[in-house]
């Protein structure tokens, strides 16, 4: 089950059924089914608090993924700062909706084992995001 909820911010406009179907398609591309994925939309301040409390990091970020995947079933909690998504969209010259879709699938890709800590893996992640986004666009 894929759930979308908010912590301390208004829910973004989202076709939850369409997005959930897309997430399942992308997961299947990597050999996974979807168990329980919880998206928690929040503010920068809430994201920072989660980053400090659970990861020991003292900086803002757009996404924090807690991976509980077992065998071939994706499970996880994905915190997304809508404040940072909005500012990243402006900085990159894309719509908020496009950036939100990119970050939603970014979390799923992390759950499938994709990394982004080195320049090489970051480039691979971007390519995989683009491939996934093309599925959503049709």
Image (cartoon, rainbow, N blue to C red):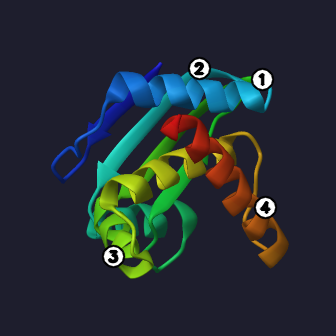
State which tag comes first along the sequence, 1 or 2: 2
Total labels drawn: 4
In the picture of the structure, the residue carrying the numbered disc 1 is 72
State which tag comes first along the sequence, 4 or 3: 3
Q: Give me the residue at 43% from left, 31% from top.
A: 19
Callout 1: SS? loop
Q: In the visual, does 130 lie left or right of 12?
A: right
The crowding category of the residue bearing disc 3, from other C-alpha atoms within 10 Å (few below 14, some 14 to 19, many at least 20), is few
> Which sits in the foreground, 58 or 97?
97
How far is disc 2 from disc 4 in space, using C-alphas? 25 Å
Q: Give me the residue at 37% from left, 63% from top.
A: 47
How far is disc 2 from disc 3 in space, using C-alphas? 33 Å
In the picture of the structure, the residue carrying the numbered disc 4 is 124
Q: Quadrant of residue 68?
A: top right
> Which sits in the foreground, 85 or 79?
85
Quick check: marks 1 and 2 in contact, CB under 8 Å?
no
How far is disc 3 from disc 1 in space, using C-alphas? 36 Å
Callout 2: SS? strand
State which tag comes first along the sequence, 2 or 4: 2
- Looking at the picture, how far across and down is residue 113, in whole percent? 77, 45
Q: Which mark is residue 90?
A: 3
Quick check: marks 2 and 4 in contact, CB under 8 Å?
no
How far is disc 4 from disc 3 in space, using C-alphas? 23 Å
């Amino acid at each position: 089950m894929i759930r979308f909820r908010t912590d301390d911010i208004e829910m973004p406009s989202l076709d939850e059924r369409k997005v959930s179907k897309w997430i399942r398609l992308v997961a299947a591309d990597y050999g996974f089914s979807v168990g329980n994925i919880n998206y928690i939309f929040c503010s920068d301040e809430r994201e920072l608090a989660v980053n400090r409390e659970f990861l020991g990091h003292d900086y803002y970020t757009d996404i924090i993924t807690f991976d509980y995947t077992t065998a071939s079933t994706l499970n996880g909690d994905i915190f997304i700062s809508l404040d940072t998504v909005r500012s990243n969209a402006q900085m990159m010259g894309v719509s908020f909706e496009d950036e939100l879709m990119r970050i939603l699938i970014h979390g799923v890709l992390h759950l499938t084992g994709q990394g982004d800590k080195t320049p090489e893996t970051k480039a691979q992640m971007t390519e995989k995001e683009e491939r996934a986004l093309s599925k959503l666009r049709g």
